[in-house]
Amino acid sequence: MGERADVVELAKRRGFFFAAAEAYGGAAGFYTFGPEGAALKRNVESAWRDRFALKEDNEEIAAPTIMPEPVFEASGHLDTFDDMLVECAECGESHRADHLVEGATALEDAEALEPAEIATILEEHEIDCPDCGAALAGQEVEEFNLMFQTSIGPGSGQPGYLRPETAQGIFVEFPRLKEYARGKLPFGVTQIGPAYRNEISPRRGLIRVRELTQAELEQFIDPEDDEPPLETVADVALRLYAVPDQEESAPAAEGYREVTVREAVDEEVVASDWIAYYLGVAQEWYERIGLDTEKLRFRQHLPGERAHYASDCWDAEAKVESAGGDWIEIAGISSRGDYDLSKHADGSGENFTVFKQYDEPQSVLEPTVDPDMSVLGPEFGGDAGAVAEALEDLAAHDPDAFEQEVVTVTVDGERYDVDTDIANFEVVEKTEAGVHITPHVIEPSFGVDRTVYALIDHGLERDELGGETRDYLSLAAEMAPTDVAVFPLVSNHEPLLESAAEVVSTLRAAGFDATRDDSGSIGRRYRRQDEVGTPFCVTVDRDGLEDDPETITLRDRDTGAQARIPTGELVGQLEALRDGEADFEALLSRYETVETADE
């Protein structure tokens, strides 16, 4: 459907999502999921957990949402987790400078530019403040850290931060998690939960918020030996928008090329088999939950916009009509290398490696030093120990340096010359059973809130039924907040009310989320359920009670078609429809079709 207001109005009126704490004026970037939205969100999370945890044989953890400052010092978030801010001198409002540039120019990746370059573009294109219209030319563009800071404990306490991603909660626990995996690679750890980003200018509903829900998998691999089960997704068709396509002077209007996973690997469109594998898994998962795959593509990050730790990254993007037809990021699949584990090893001093055992013991040559401390001590005093450690590091990384008569090391910026014979350098032969390696990480990271928004946007349809226009939400049955609604045809007939209550109890006992609605005309009840995406409605009427055996009518949301079926077969038929083992058209061919004006 056309305007953004259609989605936002529906979301607020029918209880999907709405601005939080409106009674107190609210706070930009925070949303409450109402009854329908919370149920839809839970279904998205359950489907993700089923595919990326259960079916991939991965474990799931739940880490704290607040962690101490050293975690983020080690991870680099204190230094690099920034967006570009420009403040209007006239009204004082702050804005995301790169977004202003993208909105006023043809640039799609302004965040890859430096702040000084953004400031120049603001001036050259005469970009104004979106709030008051004042010129932003000449205003400084600054880096603004997006993390929320807090204190752990009373008073000033220990500095801490709300996590900006769930990933760090997995990485910092790696020394223990590897024990649960018995030290065997590959293994994966998942987490679903909130993350917090102090966005400069939250906008467009759930698309840019300050509290969001992420579903992330950290897949730990040996980059030399571990391979994904690529054949299981080799024939999955993808729409890829790779770097070369984005850098062309006149890229294709559709903004992607269509290839299978196997073709993407063979043609080296995607360099990593692991990333290609998860692109295929993600495509299948999006199809499963009912995203319109005609509005889905995977865009490769340009070199300038990739995170500093990522060797490659592809975003799943959904085209969202209610956001002006823009492509919005709903997931990212990246290769993080060994950056995170290495950083936390350095920051904590703990062991973030796994032992990789050789098939057979191997003889290796190992450079070593055994510095004569009786000489180093008198010569270097309190720095002797640090000099000895520096000599050991040099032997491991540059053994050729010891071929000279004097070797030089640096400690705290000061150079020390040591006679090579004092260092006692030699290369010894050792037999090793294996080697300690730092695993690499492949990370599929999904934005749950944006996925919910895209499902609503893609599913919102308008047609004519029963002689009138209706809006309905065409969600996959697995995603629908309510599985089935049960109506007594009239609300003042006690036998119908009792029978409807019995049907609801039977459905709930069978595991269906069923609701009963006896308020208003039958047509109004249908419309209410259509708008929240309930895939099936059951109507109990007098004719059905008089049948032998008793019957009910089962209605399909998308078509409005109805079939009269025995009440005793309802659970089995709904299970088949929900699980994709049958479709409603086949049902209509087996049972009596009920003609109705749908009013």
Image (cartoon, rainbow, N blue to C red):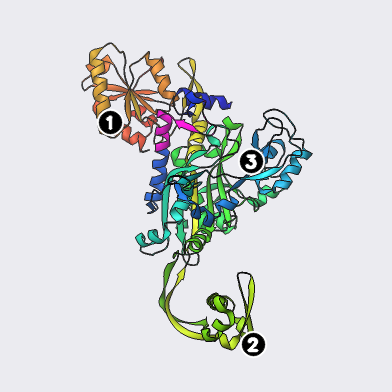
Left or right, 411 with respect to 459, comes to: right
Using the numbered discs, state the Cα–Cα distance from disc 3 to disc 1 in whole angstroms. 45 Å
Find out whether the residues at labels 3 and 1 contact each other: C-beta distance under 8 Å.
Answer: no
Which residue is situated farthest in the left direction here? 548
Against 109, residue 364 (above or below) is: below
Q: Which residue is mark 3?
A: 254
Look at 58% across and 88% down and name the residue there: 421
Against 314, residue 506 (above or below) is: above
Q: Which mark identifies residue 508?
A: 1
- The magenta region covers 25-42
Find out whether the residues at labels 2 and 3 contact each other: C-beta distance under 8 Å.
Answer: no
Q: Is residue 234 visible?
A: no
Q: Which mark identifies residue 405?
A: 2
Helix, strand, or loop for circle 2?
loop
Instruction: Give residue 245's position: percent from left, percent from top.
Output: 66, 49
Q: Report the amino acid beneath label 3.
A: Glu
Snapshot quadrant of residue 528: top left
Split into 4 quadrants, where in the image is the N terminus? top right
Left or right, 180 with respect to 92, comes to: left
